[in-house]
Image: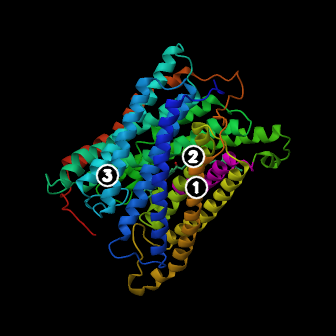
Amino acid sequence: MTSKQIDRSSSVLSLSFILIAFVAFAVAALAGVLQGLVRGGMLTLPSGVNYYQILTAHGVLMGLVFTTFFIVGFLLSGVAKTTDGLSPLELKLGWIGWVLMTVGTVIATVTILQNNASVLYTFYAPLKASPFFYISAALIVVGSWFGGFAIFAAYARWRKQNNKARSPLFAFMAVCTMVLWQIATLGVAAEVLFQLIPWSLGWVPTINVLLSRTLFWYFGHPLVYFWLMPAYIAWYVIMPKVIGGKIFSDALARLSFILLVLFSIPVGFHHQLMEPGVSSHWKFIHVILTLAVVVPSLMTAFSILAMFERRGRENGGVGLFGWLKKLPWKDVRFFAPMVGMLSFIPGGAGGIINASNQMNAVVHNTIWVTGHFHLTVATAVALTFFGISYWLLPNLTGRVVTPAVNRLGIFQTVLWIVGMLFMSGSMHFLGLLGAPRRTALAEYNGDPTALGWMPYQKLAAIGGYFLFFAAIIMVGIVVYLCFFAPKGYTEYPIGEEASAFNTTPPILERWPLWITISAVLILLAYAYPIYDVIVNAPPGSPTIRTW
Ligand code: HAS
């Protein structure tokens, strides 16, 4: 099974998702460098373009479009690989998803370019965008559901054909990711359909801001795990094969994914700790559950490190850290995700800081938070997605990576991490000095505190330069791998388990049980607060358009 190529129809489908992902990535990278230069006082935008417009373009295209397209394409490819190809029905579902998501992306981009949706990627009310922007968001979400339906159908078919045997680990993890996504997006779907679209069409005059933010963060936190889980799939399933090792424990890997599904949704109030209108008791419950969702990440750290150490020792590494030297550092398929993993250690620690009520009071709404998510999603996740691209794209196009591209990929990774250390590092410092997020260059009439931020803002802008050049190189590599690299066979690396004697409890695949527990946790954490915010609604807010 593992040596079999994915059939052509499934390859074309996955490739189509990933190509759109990188088109969005290229535009988003350009918007990113511009906004860094504006904040660093090194560039004034031409009239007709506003800072919040490019900030929205960057956040939407990078955070929502690049990630979602890449994830759906990657998951479909791995499910096709491990469940013997996608059936015609599954392919059709995948293509419906692709069309809806692509149409949604085009509409969203045009609306932002027309300056009718400068509401940033969280589209917080009462900032109001054009109805087309919200409709495009709905299309992207519904399209991604179809990608999920294709994955569920392939998984169910494989299990039926194999007497309900233990499913391939990749397919199991893809199902977990999509189960989480389908449950999480119900929140944003409710916000968009029942609040934002009617309000933006003028059918209702005001909006319940607290309800809209609560529904957004019901979705917004699991969104970050939707980004993270495909990276974890690469760390658990792909990396062992890339380094010539074995998966440390199938059972541990599956358990960590089930825990992510259970605990990543009922935690949204940790994004609203400083907001009025939600009682501290509910915030407390959400913080406890936030600390629970850290556990599967710690399990992942343990398991991946153990897998690396075993392989390093098999290769002759000795002593406490000697095995590290025996890992394939010169192979970009290993190097890029590994640098991502290393960045996730401080990135994750920053998340735990954010989650504590007292420390959140220091960092909330400061640019520290932007620094946090550039270490997590824009480094740990993005570098893993780049690492995946070096074998997935040539595998899908029937080409091979040349040694020169491998070397360029290592250089690109170094450029990315150096840029990110400057940019995200400065953002963390700036946040602690009180610099706000979501603002253009602000000197507050020459206030000394604000002037003291400027050196860090410039460092962040320099980091942005590095990142932009790294992004251009990455886009060039993607184009080369898709259209110009030499023809040949590239393996789809699927790892095998360390020991055939390890058993995985079948209960881990009892979906009705896990979905029920997930629903109970969500009801416990959200039913009353949402009821309360509807019944005791704050005064509705009129529209605010700041641009
Ligand atoms: Fe976060 C805000 C809490 C993880 C993304 N987060 C954000 C926002 C984004 C984001 C986008 O509690 C901003 C949203 C906005 O626009 O307002 N976050 C957490 C916590 C975690 C966490 C507790 N976040 C992530 C991940 C993200 C992400 C992952 C994207 C992918 N976050 C918060 C909070 C806020 C927040 C508050 C709100 C702040 C505010 O006030 O606005 C945890 O899940 C983190 C757990 C992770 C770890 C690290 C484990 C390390 C691993 C690597 C192992 C390395 C190996 C290599 C194996 C504990 C797995 C070893 C090799 C060697 C050689 C040693």
- Look at the image and say whether residue 334 sits in the magenta stretch: yes
Query: Which mark is in front, 3 or 2?
Result: 2
Q: Determine the CA span between mark 2 and mark 1.
A: 11 Å
Q: Is residue 367 left or right of residue 102?
A: right
| Residue plotted at (57% across, 72% down) | 462
The image's mark for residue 483 is 2
Of the pair 444 and 133, the residue shown nearer to us: 133
Three-letter amino acid code of the residue under disc 1: Gly
N-terminal label among 3 and 1: 3
- Kindly indicate whether the residue at mark 1 contacts the one at mark 3 (C-beta within 8 angstroms): no
Mark 3 secondary-structure assignment: helix
Where does the magenta region start and end? 329-352
For label 1, the residue is 476
For label 3, the residue is 107
Magenta: main secondary structure: helix
* Image quadrant in which you'd find residue 314: top right
Three-letter amino acid code of the residue under disc 3: Ile
Three-letter amino acid code of the residue under disc 2: Phe
Q: Residues within 10 Å of mark 2 (few under 14, many from 20)?
A: some
Of the pair 354 and 308, the residue shown nearer to us: 308
| Residue plotted at (48% across, 83% down) | 451
Image position, residue 217 (x, y; %)? 37, 50
Q: Is residue 517 left or right of residue 137?
A: right
N-terminal label among 3 and 2: 3
Mark 2 secondary-structure assignment: helix
Q: Determine the CA span between mark 3 and mark 2.
A: 28 Å
The mark tally for this picture is: 3
Q: Is residue 533 left or right of residue 359?
A: left
Q: Residues within 10 Å of mark 1 (few under 14, many from 20)?
A: few
Q: Quadrant of the C terminus?
A: bottom left
Under 8 Å from ligand 1: the CB of mark 1? no
